[in-house]
């Protein structure tokens, strides 16, 4: 364990570098050229427009107003706090608001814990002073004098620690209970106040059996007409459109180049890029034919229809019933669950059959198991290779460079940890891929699964590295994890690189500035780990609690700022991750109790230890109680609620054409850009579709009534989907997941008729 | 570990005593006087009538036909095998048939395991022979030479054990899978072929909220009419009838005495017991008045209605939907689950509110935890008191007796183990009481919970006693658990004692001969423990496997015989316990793998041990797969099935009056014996009941159209409940659970007009 001075030095260095980062952030964010890196969310929500339009020359790119720098350095914290929770929900969605509540929960738990631990436990530990007596023999660090190690074995003072463990557990449980209650209420309120949404009427059914002589569509229709006669409305078949999507994206890239050249030509009619224009036109024509034939194949080939369907019901009640009940006598067929929001669907996983699914889960659990417990083996192996001699062997031409003294000493310090760093850097991606292989249907579920895996990994690896290195680790996390987060160094560089080399049109820039989601799969486990550290320290080494507090405060401010200005959630799960957060904090409580139990039994505190065995039992009971009390609010949809909304809707909109409203909501996004006429049999409401000309004769062109509607806030995204003419509103179906294994360039199906104004 | 000779001696003694028990059984069971102890099931099913009617004098009680003794000793085994599985289902219900399949599963798993272990592992162990070399230093028993202990640490021979562990796991899993498949099919087939049953239309709803100004009945009606408008039919309120039931039972006891005296008087008119007749008449009159006022109170007092209701639906589909979905926005209100069969309902637990429920479960889990881990503490304490000196102190007058040498040595051998024996004897009862406190609604669930507790206890206690004592323990179990089971010594004694002192009427004798259920709560854990022992021995000490085999064969024969001739299941859960059996055997597999893992790692088998870590992961995956594949068949009711049965019924019986069919099915059994006129508001179908005279003026008398219909097989018990005039068929609602805390004498509400012929 580090001494107090070590920690102070480490803290000082980290604080300095954090201030450096914040200064850099203050400077960078006021540059107009970086505006789209530091405020993408404001652009997306229409709260900010291009600042460069009004300015000229170099002012469009660089800010020379010194005053603004000073303001910038000081103002981000007030900026982070300026929105109320309700405004945050409006602005960034409920998921983000609930995510921020985790930090608040951390403060609510740890502020009283820190104060009482500092006031009660530290005096008890210090005054016990066994370590002072023994000092001559064994070297103890200063921190140990403040920790439980300082108390004599068998001392009656352990009663204090026992009482504090009980008090801490009670307080933590109380806070957890109140917060679960609160989040459940927020979720229910949010769901209740939502306007009509397609997923309220839709159930996804998997493992539709193949009945010979019948198409999947007939089987689905027959089954639901038979078993849900009063509620079944229609269904949307799911097509295996991965090849089709690839072709369409290829065409879009070409179209993008064509547009670029055409605009270039319009601007400088003397410099004629006619050759390239002609070239792209020709390639697009060829591609159009391939797209048309692929399209025909999808329509004609019954094998293109996957044994999955989105089944829509005439009422929320009917959908709630179907999602919560078992349909078939064979429990592996006709598996129903709530359909995720259309933008939350991970299309690629819809086609996985039941048996393959459980084998996939087996393989992944074995992999995760090996990864968590044996990840050091390959890393140590790689590290043993990645030394200077190895490098010189592989690349002898580098020898003169490597032998330079300065570079040599740098490499000697840098190389050994490199493999581990690379591994930790790619780990979240690897875990996300693993979760995708497991076959979950929605992005939100994938993130939760990846978060769970990351948590297990961190739990085990923290354990391996020993709790002794944790102090400096927290300081490192505060610096690295949080200050780097607000600086957004990586997105900044990537954005400018893209802007220089790739961006050709506005749509391209839009994509280059895309901030993505918060990244729950990494952030949730990190947060949960801090709860674990805090709870473990609380009784054993309370002097470290203030660091945990600082982390929670600083990270809260940074993430609140980022949620307001940067991140853009891909989907809205209405806080579906909360039960995981709750149960992992309860698990941390359990771990801390068991650690304390072990510690006290080695300290021969025979009187107090047995009483401590009751704590884990109480904690497990608390967990079970919360589970039965609150979890249904996150997993199920009560019939009372469904019936209420149905009744209200029937009263207020008696003539609502629900079939038209639900049509195409769950069509694979790649089809959304096709004309009605081209969709043919693919649509859910075949009666309404114009089926007269399923033959495609003309090349596919983007729909003419395409609207860029970025101003709509995410809360209302789906509301205007009720009119079929808004179907192409890109904002309502952004960032769907393509099959991007075979294609790194994940262009969206962007419309080609935007205006070109490229910087530089 | 015992030596081979020790085991042989122990086996010999046990075989001898087992033969003794079987001889005793052969003698006792052919005595006509014991007929109702050894063949109660045949009486209940009407396959056997009183054998004494046709015989005279002493022949009515004792059998002098020597030939029949010889036949009796040999014939019980063929008798046990004479019924086919289908006949057993007809005769004793599906639960019993599935219970017997556990033994068959044991044989299917362990016959190949035993053969291959004896052929492969024992030769490997014997030829390794480390222990022979070391013999001079340490004393090893002969068994160790055949076990894995005989293999040198670090030997490559452990690969054989590793391979066998994989093969055994695969074989066990395969058998478990096939059996689960088979049992699930049997269950579905059984449920599908059942005729209309009340529980198919009924859901029990708990935690009905108290809305001021509305009665519970109004609240329930309103809620279900609103949220299940197309399917809700009616509901049966649940009354707190514990006091009423107590009074009715008191009256019955008096009526019994009165009848006894009256018949005595009729037989011997000269000996006039007029006084006692008058006395009983008067007391009955007083009681009648109290019953009437209590009855009024139940009808009038809204507090007598508990916040629970049996809600009936117009279709199986509607009930299936309601049972499987969440009703209310508040997940602690309106909790719905399938209603158990009426005879399976444990009425007393219906009134427990949600919060109290979770506190009860907390208290019970703490108690079970303490019981499992610390049960030896009080027993050791009691044992330290229960020695000769203590006894002499407490009862000094016994000193002369105790000081006799023979008695003294007997007591010295007997006393120390007495406390443990008494504890083990009352343990199942204690565990059942604990399960009742937990608040489960049905007898079947109570039995499953008690079985789980008993299993944990046995798991821990076997561990404490050490695996070394297990060999003799198995032999003891075979003798004690199985031979004693078939001899039925305790029921035999109790029956004859009751016959001598208590039985006054035929109905009393009926009760005295009541064999009860198999006692799943004790037998399932015992069986599961044998699976554990077998799986642990299989690789480590395979020589003990034959004993496990003998247990399975012998116990199978005995229990098959008993199920045919003795036991009478109280309820039919259609094999609802199988998922527990399955998962405990899988848990045994896991335990055996982990034990082997620990053993091999102490044996320094560095090459083979890591490969063994995959086995538990595979096993857990297998468990999860089976759970998702088969468990829904035991927990849910598929809508497809419900719809099919509804449609068929509508076609075959278009004019069925479902409301009349369902009326009173879930009325508290104590009300079932009242006249229609007296039921008043209590009935579910108030419109049909004659509400004109809710006032009770006449004393309550048993219903005149009472039918003893024991001939009906259990499969059809509920079928004839469709006619309301069969409502009083006692066979369809036997052995319901009273509140018997305050009253040990749990008389049934039996009708008083049976004929008296009492054997001296």
Image: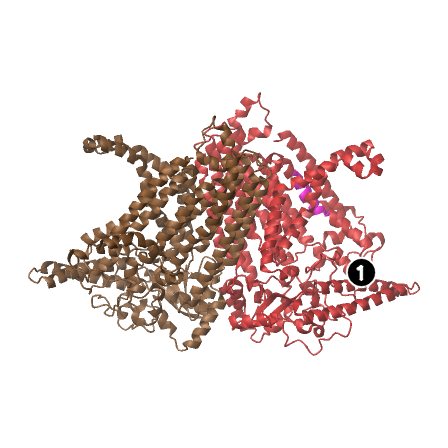
Chain colours: A brown, B red
Residue B242 at what x, y percent from top left? 70, 62
Residue B419 at what x, y percent from top left? 71, 40
Which residue of the protein is positioned furthest toward the front in this rendering?
A67
Identify whether A524 is placed above or below A682: above
Q: Is residue B488 visible?
A: yes
Relative to residue B671, is residue A142 drawn left or right? Answer: left
Residue indicated by mark 1: B505
- Quadrant in the picture for residue B391: top right
- Circle 1 crowding by C-alpha within 10 Å: few under 14, some 14–19, many from 20: many
Magenta-tinted stretch: B475-488
User: In the depicted view, which residue is nearer to us: A242 or A643?
Assistant: A643
- Quadrant in the picture for residue A339: bottom left
Which residue of the protein is positioned furthest toward the top in this rendering?
B136
Residue A304 at what x, y percent from top left? 32, 60
Identify whether B131 is placed above or below A9: above
> What is the magenta segment's predominant secondary structure?
helix
User: In the depicted view, which residue is nearer to us: B122 or A664?
Assistant: A664
Q: Is residue A115 magenta?
A: no
Quarter of the image where the N terminus of chain A is located: top left
Mark 1 chain: B
Question: Residue drawn 36% across and 47% down?
Answer: A431
């Amino acid at each position: 364990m580090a001494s107090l001075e070590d920690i102070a030095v480490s803290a000082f260095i980290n604080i300095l570098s954090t201030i450096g980062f914040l200064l850099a952030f203050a400077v960078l964010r006021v540059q107009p050229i970086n505006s789209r890196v530091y405020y993408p969310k404001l652009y997306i929500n229409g709260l900010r427009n291009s600042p460069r339009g009004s300015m000229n020359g170099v002012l469009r790119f660089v800010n020379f107003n010194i005053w603004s720098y000073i303001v910038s350095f000081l103002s981000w914290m007030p900026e982070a706090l300026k929105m109320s929770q309700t405004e945050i929900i409006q602005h960034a969605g409920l998921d983000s608001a609930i995510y921020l509540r985790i930090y608040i929960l951390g403060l609510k738990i740890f502020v009283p814990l820190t104060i009482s631990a500092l006031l009660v436990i530290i005096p008890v530990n210090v005054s016990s002073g066994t370590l002072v007596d023994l000092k001559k023999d064994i070297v103890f660090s200063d921190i140990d004098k403040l920790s439980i190690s300082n108390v004599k074995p068998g001392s009656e003072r352990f009663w204090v620690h026992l009482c504090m463990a009980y008090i801490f557990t009670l307080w933590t449980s109380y806070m957890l209970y109140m917060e679960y209650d609160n989040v459940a209420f927020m979720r229910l309120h949010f769901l209740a106040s939502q306007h009509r949404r397609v997923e309220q009427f839709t159930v996804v059914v998997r493992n539709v059996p193949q009945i010979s002589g019948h198409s999947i569509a007939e089987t689905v229709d027959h089954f639901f007409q038979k078993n849900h006669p009063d509620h079944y409305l229609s269904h949307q078949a799911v097509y295996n459109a991965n090849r089709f999507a690839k072709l369409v994206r290829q065409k879009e890239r070409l179209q993008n180049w064509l547009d670029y050249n055409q605009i270039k030509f319009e601007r400088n009619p003397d410099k004629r890029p006619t050759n390239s224009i002609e070239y792209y036109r020709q390639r697009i024509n060829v591609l159009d034919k391939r797209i048309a034939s692929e399209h025909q194949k999808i329509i004609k080939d019954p094998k293109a229809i996957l044994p999955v369907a989105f089944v829509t019901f005439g009422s929320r009640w009917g959908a709630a019933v179907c999602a919560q009940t078992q349909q078939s006598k064979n429990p592996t067929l006709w598996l129903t669950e709530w359909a995720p929001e259309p933008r939350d669907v991970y299309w690629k996983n819809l086609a996985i059959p039941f048996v393959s699914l459980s084998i996939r889960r087996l393989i992944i659990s074995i992999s995760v198991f090996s990864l968590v417990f044996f990840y050091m083996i390959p890393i140590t192996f790689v590290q043993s290779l990645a030394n200077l001699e190895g490098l010189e062997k592989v690349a002898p031409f580098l020898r003169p460079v490597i032998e330079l003294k300065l570079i040599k000493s740098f490499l000697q310090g840098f190389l050994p940890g490199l493999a581990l760093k690379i591994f930790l850097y790619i780990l979240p991606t690897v875990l996300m891929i693993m979760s995708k292989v497991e076959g979950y249907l929605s992005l939100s579920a994938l993130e939760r699964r990846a978060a769970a895996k990351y948590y297990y990994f961190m739990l085990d690896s923290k354990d391996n590295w020993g709790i002794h290195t944790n102090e400096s680790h927290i300081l490192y996390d505060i610096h690295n994890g949080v200050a780097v987060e607000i600086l957004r160094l990586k997105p900044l560089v990537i954005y400018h690189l893209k802007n220089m080399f790739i961006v050709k049109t506005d749509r391209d820039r839009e994509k280059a500035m895309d901030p993505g989601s918060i990244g729950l799969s990494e952030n949730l486990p990190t947060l949960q780990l801090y709860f674990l550290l805090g709870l473990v320290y609380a009784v054993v080494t309370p002097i470290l609690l203030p660091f945990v507090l600082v982390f929670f405060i600083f990270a809260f401010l940074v993430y609140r700022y980022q949620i307001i200005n940067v991140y853009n959630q891909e989907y809205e799960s209405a806080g579906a991750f909360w039960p995981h957060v709750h149960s992992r904090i309860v698990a941390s409580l359990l771990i801390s109790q068991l650690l304390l139990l072990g510690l006290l039994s080695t300290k021969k505190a025979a009187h107090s230890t047995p009483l401590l065995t009751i704590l884990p039992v109480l904690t497990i009971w608390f967990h079970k109680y919360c589970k039965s009390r609150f979890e249904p609010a996150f997993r199920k949809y009560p019939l009372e609620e469904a019936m209420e909304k149905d009744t209200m809707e029937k009263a207020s909109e008696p003539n609502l054409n629900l079939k038209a409203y639900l049509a195409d909501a769950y069509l694979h996004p790649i089809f959304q850009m096709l004309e009605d006429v081209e969709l043919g049999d693919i649509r859910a409401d075949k009666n309404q579709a114009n089926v007269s000309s399923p033959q495609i004769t003309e090349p596919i062109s983007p729909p003419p009534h395409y609207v860029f509607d970025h101003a709509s806030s995410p809360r209302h995204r789906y509301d205007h989907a009720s009119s079929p003419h808004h179907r192409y509103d890109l904002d309502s179906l952004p960032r769907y997941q393509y099959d991007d294994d075979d294609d790194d360039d994940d262009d969206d199906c962007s419309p080609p008729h935007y205006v070109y104004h490229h910087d530089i």
